[in-house]
Amino acid sequence: MLPPRSDFPADFVFGAATSAYQIEGSSNGNAGASHWDSFAATPGNIMDDSNGSIACDHYNRWPEDLDLIRDAGMGAYRFSTSWARVMPDGATPNPEGMDFYDRLVDGMLERGLQPHLTYYHWELPAALAVKGGWQNRDIAARFADYCVAVNARLGDRIAGAATLNEPWCIAWLSHFLGHHAPGLRDIRAAGHAMHHVLLAHGQAMSALRAEGAKNLGIVLNFETAHPADDTPAAARTAEVQDAIYNQWFIRAVMGQGYPEAALEGLRPHMPAGWEEDMQAIAQPIDWLGVNYYTRKLHAPGAGLWPAARDVAGPLPKTQMDWEIRPEGLTEFLTRLKRDHVGDLPIFVTENGMAEAAGPDVTQDPTRVAFIGDHLRAAKAAMDQGVNLRGFFYWSLLDNYEWGWGYGPRFGLVHVDYATQKRTPKSSWHAMRAMLAG
């Protein structure tokens, strides 16, 4: 059961979110290769050996998909532009790619939807990846150029824009844990990427401000880090994981410096002169995007820093085997207000769950309960003074779930990948009923 719409202010934004590579189809529209195309073409990287070349064919079916958002009663759509589509070589604009996003934004406005843009949702042009990608300091200037080019074409119609989506995934998950493109397990590569992704944010913010862009922010993901038991060693392990995951990026963006618990392991592997970049990183933002899904239980592990292992928790789990813990959203929103952002506007830019399709693909009762519980958790944070302005469900559509391929289904709308038929689920209908109330 979802809470009534009247629990939230009249101007509170409800929307759905997607990302370009997960839905558009990278083979469409003269797009260039991204490092995800390369990663997916490498045996063993994707669970079902699939890729995003067709995905949900949103490139051709976007009018139908925007209709689904409008018809659910939502007022906004959070989408991303593909750097590889906009600039196939990482530098030269592709008119066909720009035209696509022009049509897409106009289509949102025609349907009364606020366009909320994310410049980077993990699609690095392969042409830049082979030059070192996020390990290479030059990526910051290249990213700023890309953002300026997109802003020049779309900025006059965008309600708000984020530089990056989930830099922890861009840097740590992809360069240290190796689960996402480029699939590295290299602490020096991770140290460089953890810094350069933030430098790119800072340089892009400065460049966009110089162009007159308004309402700019960044989207960070947060994941509760609890000790697996009551030992001091487990507490210390969780502290380090919290520093890497939940503190590194928000502290730097807000001018509070990198957390010492993370620097203890990363300092020897950071790029030379990184300290001199911290002021450039800490550009003022107009809002913060918060992505929240789950928690992890951490125990000490053998071997080198950070020497941690995850322990299965006792709570109900999603199709991704992620624990369902709504109160964590309240905890992070209030913690962010207290420790980092004060009264800065916050949006929940992603929250959702994967639930396998049953015999009747329209029925997803666990997702309905999940959404209701997390909306109530968001309202609880607002009642404690958090300046929360909106909530975007992840995701509008079942889609390509990166290293997991097409197995996990996060969508409010079921997608038959063989026919591309869209079928709204009971969660979509529940959202529509709430928003009509």
Image (spheres, rainbow, N blue to C red):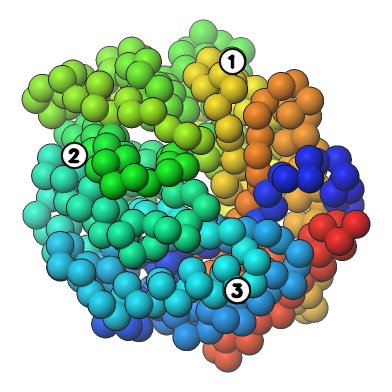
Q: Residue furthest top?
A: 232
Residue drawn at (20%, 53%) of the image: 145
Mark 2: few, some, or many residues within 10 Å (few <14, many ≥20)?
many
- Quadrant for residue 338, please give it: top right
Q: Is residue 430 above or below residue 111?
A: above
The residue labelled by disc 1 is 338
Q: Are marks 1 and 2 in contact (CB under 8 Å)?
A: no
Residue drawn at (55%, 38%) of the image: 290
Regarding mark 1 in the picture, which secondary structure is present there?
A: helix
Question: Percent x, y for residue 26?
Answer: 35, 76
The residue labelled by disc 2 is 189
- Whether residue 234 is visible, yes or no, is no
Please name the amino acid that badge 2 sits on. Ala
Q: Give the foreground label among 1 and 2.
A: 1
> Which mark sits nearer the N-terminus, 3 or 1?
3
Please name the amino acid that badge 3 sits on. Glu
Q: Is residue 331 above or below residue 370?
A: above
